[in-house]
Image (cartoon, rainbow, N blue to C red):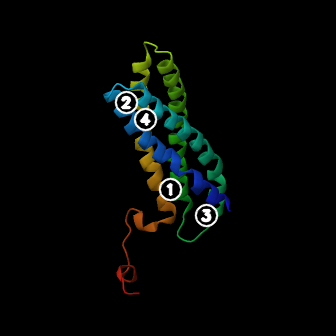
């Protein structure tokens, strides 16, 4: 396995975990269920761990692909900049989620406040996760880049 492969193995979970965690936390708040909220907190914590793994493998993945055809250093740089922002948000969300688990387990009066704080941070995370996923996909999938125009041979399904 190459360094790029390791990055591809770990980089999807922070995105998907944040999106699922956001939906689960929203449901936990709506249904007033600490158990459901705790599931989202665990997802956020795991997402933060995988974000750290993604950041640790990203630089080596960059070195593998940066000189490949149709891949520019600018598109990788853009992805890296957004990924760094997402990672920071997920680290904060992970810490808030640890606090949320603790306050729920102790039936602390601030548990609801922590869940709303986590929801706001997670919403920012979902926004950034979408951007990271798209910019990462654009590195190898030229067909999703802005301004992509398929050539006649790319539209021909009979080849």
Earlier residue among tags 4 and 1: 4
Instruction: Name the residue carrying label 1.
Output: 136
Q: Going from the N terminus, do you reach mark 2 or mark 4 first?
A: 2
Residue named by callout 2: 28
Vertical side of 26 occupied by 53: above or below: below
Who comes first in sequence, dot 3 or dot 1? Answer: 3
Cα distance between the residues tagged 3 and 4 = 30 Å
Badge 2 element: helix
Other residues around mark 1 within 10 Å, as few (<14) / some (14–19) / many (≥20): many
Question: Residue sitting at 57 percent across and 60 percent down?
Answer: 73
Q: Quadrant of the C terminus?
A: bottom left
Q: Position of residue 66 (x, y in %)?
A: 61, 63
Kindly state the secondary structure of the residue where label 1 is placed: helix
Q: Earlier in the sequence, mark 3 or mark 4?
A: 3
Mark 2 burial class by Cα count in 10 Å: few <14, some 14-19, many 20+ = some
Of labels 3 and 4, the one closer to you: 4
In the rendered image, residue 77, in percent from the top left (x then y), is placed at 55, 53
Identified at 39% across, 36% down, the residue is 24
In x, y percent, where is residue 74? 53, 58
Residue found 44% across the figure and 22% down from its top:
114
x, y (%) of residue 53?
A: 62, 45
What residue would you read off at disc 4? 122
Check the picture and name the quadrant holding the N terminus: bottom right
Residue 66 visible within the image: no
Could you say which is closer to the camera, residue 31 or residue 126? 31
Cα distance between the residues tagged 4 and 1: 20 Å
Q: Which mark is residue 65?
A: 3
């Amino acid at each position: 396995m190459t360094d790029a492969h390791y990055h591809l193995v770990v980089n999807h979970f922070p995105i998907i975990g944040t999106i699922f965690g956001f939906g689960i936390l929203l449901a936990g708040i709506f249904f007033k269920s600490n158990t459901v909220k705790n599931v989202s907190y665990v997802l956020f914590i795991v997402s933060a761990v995988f974000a750290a793994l993604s950041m640790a493998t990203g630089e080596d993945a960059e070195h593998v692909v940066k000189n490949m055809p149709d891949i520019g250093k600018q598109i990788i740089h853009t992805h890296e900049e957004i990924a760094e922002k997402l990672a920071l948000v997920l680290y904060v969300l992970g810490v808030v989620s640890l606090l949320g688990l603790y306050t729920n387990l102790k039936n602390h009066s601030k548990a609801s406040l922590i869940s709303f704080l986590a929801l706001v941070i997670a919403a920012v995370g979902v926004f950034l996760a979408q951007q990271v996923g798209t910019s990462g996909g654009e590195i190898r999938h030229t067909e999703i880049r802005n301004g992509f125009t398929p050539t006649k041979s790319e539209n021909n399904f009979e080849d």
